[in-house]
């Protein structure tokens, strides 16, 4: 190629480069702006997840890091299966029927127009898989057993905590936000007071509530003694230990949800309430038709964050009850911790961690999928 041809093509290439730069300058600037975060996120989040997947395929001893044995999916098989496992239509029949009742309810809501048909379809598929299929699997009566029964009891306790704590913390946070929404020095003082518990560490939290719930010398026991009530073994009774931890978590975390709901309430146009009052709408009608629709995005975010946090409960359980009494409060994170750092089975602990991650991902996916979409 001659020098004249190269000289003629050079301005054309420069022109193409300038056109590409003009079209993609904002994109390049965005990636450069995100680069520091992406590097940190990849190092401290993406890489550990990939490492956990790799470790879950091995028999990996913490005390013998170099002596690991590839076992494929055996860690997962040991976690979720056992010997003599059967499927029975009558197993947990009442709970399964209650869950399957969501299918006709979802399609009824879809026919009314309050739910999209695609969302009703997703909800129906999830209900069929979970309630018609998975919940029917259990060890047979003739000598059947799980390979790791502690895993399933720990997972059940975790789900119980999620079901007890999430609605309570979300509803109380919303109620507090509604009560403290507005302007005024006193309201600011109350907001600070209610949010202050959230800044405590888990060790301080458990120290406060452990002393409060102590059945002999605790503050609550001394208060109830004035009314002739005998000391209540909050943390040593299998029926009361989990509710006590739920109440402790409520006191600790509700302030954060209150702040999120306050931010959502302040984004609602106040002229909507003025127009509703002119039309004669009462407080309940305003709450139903203005406040709740205006808080849809905030509520979804609060619920998703709360469910993820509840699935990861560990500190208050481990310090207050150590999983007792009788394993009634042992949660999945505690079982993962003990398997990895007490029993030195890092591969098995990694498999359980990925199982928990998958559960949180599926729950979050369906929440976002079933949430109303902006037109």
Image: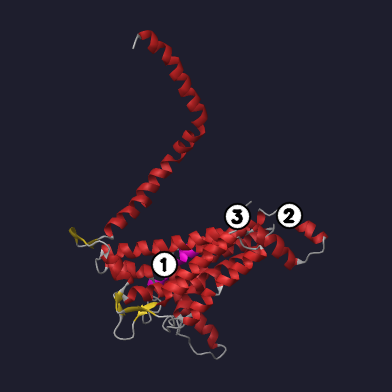
Is residue 7 depicted above or below 71 in this figure?
above
Decide which of 185, 16 is in the foreground and name it: 16
Between disc 2 and disc 3, the foreground one is 3
In the rendered image, residue 146, in percent from the top left (x then y), is placed at 31, 77
Left or right of residue 341: residue 276: right
User: What span is colored magenta in the figure?
Assistant: 307-318
The answer for how far apart the CA atoms under marks 1 and 3 are is 41 Å
Decide which of 273, 77 is in the foreground and name it: 77
Task: Kindly indicate whether the residue at mark 3 contacts the one at mark 2 (C-beta within 8 angstroms).
Answer: no
Name which residue lies at 33% across and 85% down: 141
In the rendered image, residue 349, in percent from the top left (x then y), is placed at 30, 65
Q: Main secondary structure of the magenta part?
A: helix
Which residue, given by chain and number where applicable, does mark 1 sit on? Answer: 203
Between disc 1 and disc 2, the foreground one is 2
Which residue, given by chain and number where applicable, does mark 2 sit on? Answer: 270
Residue 274 lies in the magenta stretch: no
Could one spot residue 171 in this view of the protein?
no
């Amino acid at each position: 190629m001659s020098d004249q041809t190269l000289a003629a093509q050079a301005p054309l290439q420069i022109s193409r480069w300038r056109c590409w730069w003009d079209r993609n300058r904002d994109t390049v600037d965005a990636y450069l702006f995100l680069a520091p975060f992406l590097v940190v996120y990849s190092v401290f989040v993406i890489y550990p997840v990939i490492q956990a997947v790799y470790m879950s395929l091995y028999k990996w001893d913490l005390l013998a890091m170099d002596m690991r044995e590839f076992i494929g999916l055996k860690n997962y098989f040991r976690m979720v299966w056992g010997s003599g496992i059967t499927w029975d239509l009558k197993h947990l029949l009442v709970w399964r029927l209650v869950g399957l009742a969501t299918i006709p309810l979802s399609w009824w809501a879809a026919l009314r127009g309050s739910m999209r048909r695609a969302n009703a379809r997703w909800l129906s598929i999830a209900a069929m898989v979970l309630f018609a299929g998975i919940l029917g699997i259990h060890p047979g009566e003739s000598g059947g057993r799980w390979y790791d029964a502690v895993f399933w009891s720990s997972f059940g306790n975790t789900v119980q905590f999620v079901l007890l704590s999430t609605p309570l913390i979300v509803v109380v946070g919303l109620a507090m936000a509604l009560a403290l929404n507005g302007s005024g020095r006193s309201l600011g003082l109350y907001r600070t007071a209610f949010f202050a518990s959230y800044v405590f560490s888990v060790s301080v939290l458990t120290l406060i509530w452990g002393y409060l719930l102590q059945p002999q010398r605790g503050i609550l026991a001394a208060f109830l003694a004035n009314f002739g009530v005998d000391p209540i073994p909050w943390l040593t009774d299998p029926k009361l230990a989990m509710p006590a931890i739920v109440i402790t978590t409520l006191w600790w975390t509700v302030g954060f949800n209150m702040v999120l709901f306050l931010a959502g309430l302040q984004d609602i146009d106040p002229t909507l309430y003025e127009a509703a009052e002119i039309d004669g709408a009462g407080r309940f009608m305003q709450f139903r038709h203005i406040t709740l629709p205006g808080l849809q995005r905030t509520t979804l975010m609060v619920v998703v964050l709360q469910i993820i946090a509840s699935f990861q409960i560990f500190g208050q359980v481990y310090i207050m009850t150590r999983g007792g009494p009788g394993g009634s409060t042992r949660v999945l994170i505690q079982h993962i911790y003990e398997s990895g750092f007490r029993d030195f089975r890092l591969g098995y602990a990694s498999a359980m961690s990925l199982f928990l991650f998958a559960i949180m991902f599926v729950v979050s996916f369906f929440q976002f999928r079933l949430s109303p979409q902006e037109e």
